[in-house]
Image (spheres, grey):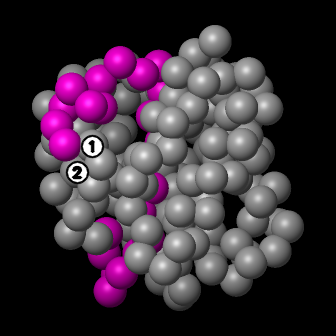
Amino acid sequence: MKKVLIAYSSRTGTTQKMADYLAEGFRMSDNQVEALKISTLKDEKDISGYDAYLFGCPTYHKDMTGGMKQFLFKAERANLIGKIAGAFGSHTHSGEAAPMVFDTMQHVFKMDVTTLGPLNLTEEIMSNDEGVKACHDYAKAIAEKL
C-alpha cells in the first residue's frame, strides 16, 4: 500500500470537495491517503514521506492563493524530486491556479507528474456527478503509476 498526500487550499469549499473525491479515488485503488489543508502542514517534515503528492488550489483573481504560494516554498524544501505528482483546482471562469501549481511541481520540484496534466474543473461541474467522476478517474490514473 502506497501513501499519498493531498494538500489543498480552498476558499469556498469546492477545492476541498475535489480533495475529498480524489482521496476516495485513491482509496478505491487500495492506497493510504491523507487529504490535508495546507495550513496544517507547518514545515517540510510534515510534507515528506509520501509516495505521491497532489496539490490543489482554486483560482482567485487569475492566480493561486497567497497561502498556496507560501506552501510551495515549504514543499520545495521537502526534496520531492522524482515523486509522483498531480495538481488540481476549481474555478469559476479563468482557471490559472492548477496549471501554475502543476508547472511548479514539474519544472521547479522535478517531480514525476501525470501525463494528464492538472485537473482543472469549474465549480459548476463540481456541483454534479461529472465532477465526482473526474476526480475519481484522475486519482485512479495517478494510482496506476504507484
Q: Tell me the element at label 2.
A: helix
Q: Which mark is drawn over residue 142?
A: none
Horizontal and vertical percent for residue 111?
37, 29
Point out the image quarter for the C terminus. top right
- Residue 45 part of the magenta segment: yes
Q: Which amino acid does label 2 sit on?
A: Phe
Horizontal and vertical percent for residue 18?
61, 59
Q: Tell me the element at label 1.
A: loop
Q: In this view, does 2 lie to the left or right of 60?
A: right
Horizontal and vertical percent for residue 4?
52, 29
Q: What residue type is labelled 1?
A: Leu
Q: Which residue was labeled with disc 2?
A: 71
Q: Which residue was labeled with disc 1?
A: 41
- Residue furthest to the front in view is 40
Q: Is residue 54 left or right of residue 79?
A: right
Q: Residue at x 21, y 26 (%)?
A: 45
Point out the image quarter for the N terminus. top right
Magenta region, residue range: 42-64
Residue 125 vertical position relative to residue 52 in the rendered view, above or below: below
Between 50 and 81, which is closer to the camera in this rendering? 50
Other-residue count near label 1 (Cα within 10 Å), few / some / many at <14 / 14–19 / ≥20: some
Question: What whole-number distance in Å separates the C-alpha atoms at marks 1 and 2?
Answer: 8 Å
